[in-house]
Amino acid sequence: MLHHGLNLCGKTATGKEEKLNGLACYVTTPESNSTPTSILICHDIFGWKMPNTRLITDALATEGFAVFVPHFFNGFSAPAADSLDIAMAPAGTVGSVCPALSVVPSVAYAVLTLKSSYGELVASFATFLKERHDINKLGSIGFWFGGRPSLLLGSTTPPLADAVGQAHAGDWSTPPSKDAENLVVLGLIIFSGQDRSIKDEDGAGLIEAMEKRNKEEKTKGWFDYHVHAPSTIHGFAIQCNEDDPMQRAERDLALANTKAFFKKWLLEGGAKL
C-alpha cells in the first residue's frame, strides 16, 4: 500500500474531533488555545479524514491559528479504506492509475450529488464561525473539490472570509480568470504546470487577471499566486510523492506559501482594501 505519500514527514495528526454547526469537525488549536484568528479547510473528494488534510491542519495551527476541517460530505460514506490507499496514492505515481478506477463510481456519485450542497455547507460553516464562535478574522483554503467553494467565500458582498485560497481546484468559472476577478478579499491560488483541471491558456489568463488586479488595487501582493514547474501535476500540494525530490520540494514550498499568506493577511494586518 502506498502510505508513503500520505504523511507529511511521517508525522501523526494531533488535533481532535468535535461536533460544530451540526457537522463532525477536525480541529487543531494553537498553543494559546484561542480561536480569534482561524482558518477553515475545505477538504477534497477523499474527505475530512484524509491523513494529509489533518497534517496540513496541524501545520497551520503551529503558526497561531485555530484550524477547522468540517465533514462537508455530511452523511456520505467515502470509498473503503483499502480503495482509498490506492486512490490517494501520491500524485504522479503511474501504478495508481488502473487500480484507482475501482473507486470511480463512488467518486462520481459524490461529485454528482454533493456539488451544490458542499458549497452551501461551507458558507454556513463560515457564517457560524464568524457569528457564533468568536472568530474575528477567518481565512479559508480548499483542495481540489473544495477549491472553488473556498474562493467563493471571498467573492460575495459582504465576504464570508477575510482571505481565501485554493490548491489545484477541480472546478473553475468560465473562463477561470473570473475566479480572480470576482474576489473582494485577498486570494492565494496554487496550481501546477500540468494541472489537468485547467488548460494552459486558462492558467495564463488567470495569472494575467491576478496581476491586473494587483496593479489596479495599487497594493503589492494583493494576490499571492504560485505556479509550479511543468513536471508538477494536479494534487501535489496534498498528495505529494515523497520519493520525488522535486514534487516534495514544491509541496513544501506550497505549504510555506500558504502559511506566509495567512500570517501576512490575517495575523499581521496586511493591506486595507
Image (spheres, helix red, strand yellow):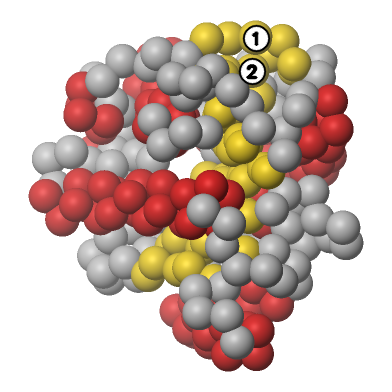
Q: Which residue is mark 2?
A: 25
Q: CA distance from mark 1 to mark 2?
A: 5 Å
How far across and how far down the image is residue 180, in percent?
A: 65, 73
Q: Which residue is mark 1?
A: 18
Q: At 58% from the left edge and 57% from the top edge, which residue is drawn?
A: 269
Badge 1 density bin: few <14, some 14–19, many ≥20, Cα 10 Å: some
Q: At 63% from the left edge and 27% from the top edge, which residue is drawn?
A: 35
Which residue type does callout 1 highlight? Glu
How far across and how far down the image is residue 47, in percent?
A: 56, 27
Q: At 54% from the left edge and 71% from the top edge, which residue is drawn?
A: 223
Quadrant in the picture for the C terminus: bottom right
Quadrant in the picture for the N terminus: top left
Residue 102 in sight here = no
* Viewer-proximal residue among 266 and 161: 266
Q: Is residue 105 left or right of residue 75?
A: left
Q: Is residue 127 left or right of residue 89?
A: right
Which residue type does callout 2 highlight? Cys
Q: At 73% from the left edge and 58% from the top edge, which residue is drawn?
A: 154
The answer to whether the residues at label 1 and label 2 have Cβ atoms under 8 Å apart is yes
How far across and how far down the image is residue 175, in percent?
A: 67, 78
